[in-house]
Image (tube, rainbow, N blue to C red):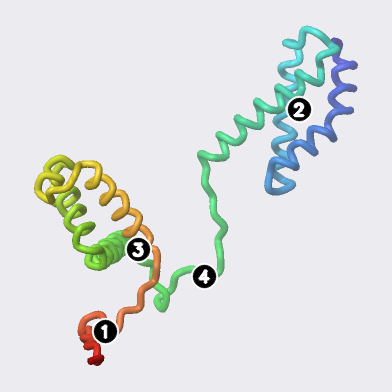
Amino acid sequence: MNDRELSKKIADASKTVFSYCRARTSNRHDAEDLCQDILFELVKSSENLRDKNAFYGFMWAVADNVYKQWLRKKARFVTCELTEDIPSEENPVISVEEEESADIYLLRRELTLLSEKYRRAVIMYYIENKSCRQTSDILKISESMVKYLLFKSRQKLKEGMSMERKLGALSYAPKSLVPLYT
């Protein structure tokens, strides 16, 4: 295929390629950049085209490969928008240490709220570094039951840590309930 035929085919296909790019990107600027990359690669690799009747299949293969490369390149560079809520003295940024201590506090809180059988299994396995076999021997339950307790405990801990709990006076000074029927 000579340069004139190639230029005509690329010019005819450029709107289609741009539509392809627009459908796969979040904004017009990214679509234009991606389209330009695809068309450039198409011109550059046109010498590899063996059959001029297979141009459109070749074009879509090139477009797909360039799009995949573009996604990989974009994934390496994570960007975020600068917003107006920049931290100030009234609204300080929480440090990593403070955030980790808050997570540890939440984990401890949720551990105390687990029922005894779940809590004992978690403490033996994760804190005392006992194996499932050792934990099952100590608790006198099957090894598969220990695995089930650990699985359910992780679910409950994850759910509890993401939930907001309001603890009041009843959390540290519970009242006792006495039924008054005769």
Q: Quadrant of residue 106?
A: bottom left
First-in-chain label (2 vs 3)? 2
Q: Are marks 1 and 2 in contact (CB under 8 Å)?
A: no
Considering the numbered disc 4 on the image, is that residue within a helix, a strand or a loop? Answer: loop
Residue linked to disc 4: 85
- Residue type at mark 2 is Leu
Residue depicted at 76% across the width and 15% down the height: 46
Residue linked to disc 3: 161
- Residue type at mark 4 is Asp
- Residue type at mark 3 is Met
Residue linked to disc 1: 170
Residue linked to disc 2: 39
List x then y, in percent, for residue 63: 71, 27
- Residue type at mark 1 is Leu
The reply, left or right, for residue 133 in relation to residue 12 is left
Considering the numbered disc 2 on the image, is that residue within a helix, a strand or a loop? Answer: helix
